[in-house]
Image: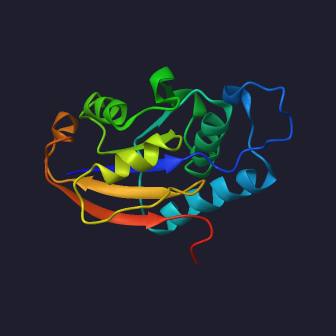
Amino acid sequence: MKSLYIIRHAKSSWGDFSLPDIERPLNERGKNDAPMMAQRLLDKKISIDVFISSPAKRAHKTCKLFCKEYKKDEESILLLDHLYHAEADTFFKVVSDIDDKFKSAAIFSHNPGITHFVNSLGLDVKIDNMPTCAVFGVNLLSGKWQDFKKGEKAFEFFEYPKLT
C-alpha cells in the first residue's frame, strides 16, 4: 500500500501586487497554519517519506514548514516546475513517477488544479474547493506508484485549518 497526501499551499500574501504570482510569499496566517497542519498529521501517526513541491514561493515555504515539523531536511524536497498551476493529468504523472522505495508522499501545489485532481481520483468523496493548507489523504491499495491512476484507491481523510 502507498499513501499520498495532497496539500494546497498555505495562505499567501497579496500585500505586494508588483510581485509575480510565483513569488508571492505566505502571510502570517499561512506561516501559522502550515506547522499546525503538519502537527495534525504527526498526531495521526502519519509518516511522509518524500516531499514534492511546486517551485512557487508559497508552496515551497509550506513544504519547508511541514519538513521542519517532520524533522526532515528541506534540501531533500523535490521541486517540480510542472506542479506550478498543474492540471489533474500532471498530478497523475508526478505520482506515477514517484520511486517505489517511498511508501508515502506529500505533494504541495495550487488551486484549481489540486481540487480537480482530488475530484478525479474516482473516490466517493468530492471536494468543492481545497482550502489553503488543506490536506487530502488517499491510499493506493497496490504497491506501485505507477498504478496510481487506474489502481484501486481508498479515501483516508480530508482536513484543513478551519476544520475543528
Give the residue displayed 45% in from the left and 61% down from the top: 128
138 is higher (above) or lower (below) than 21 = below
Residue 55: image location, x then y, percent: 58, 26
Image quarter in which the C terminus is found: bottom right
Q: Which residue is drawn at 21% across and 42% down?
A: 148
Tally of numbered discs:
0
Q: Which one is nearer the viewer's eye here, 92 or 95?
A: 92
Where does the image place residue 9, in percent across and percent down from the top left? Answer: 59, 45
Tell me how the rendering is colored: rainbow
| Left/right of residue 120 with respect to residue 43 in the rendered view | left
Residue in the foreground of this view, choosing between 47 and 110: 110
Residue found farthest to the top: 81
Location of residue 96 with respect to 105 vertically, above or below: above
Relative height, residue 39 to residue 21 (above, below) = below
The quadrant holding residue 114 is top left
Residue 75, quarter of picture: top right
- Most distant residue in the bottom direction: 164
Across and down, in percent, residue 72 comes to 55, 41
- The residue that appears at 64% across and 49% down in the rendered structure is 10
Q: For residue 14, what is the image quadrant?
A: top right
> Is 52 placed above or below 133 here?
above
Residue 143, given in percent of the width and then of the height, sits at 15, 44
Residue 161 falls left or right of residue 1: right
Q: Nearer the viewer, residue 60 or 130?
A: 130
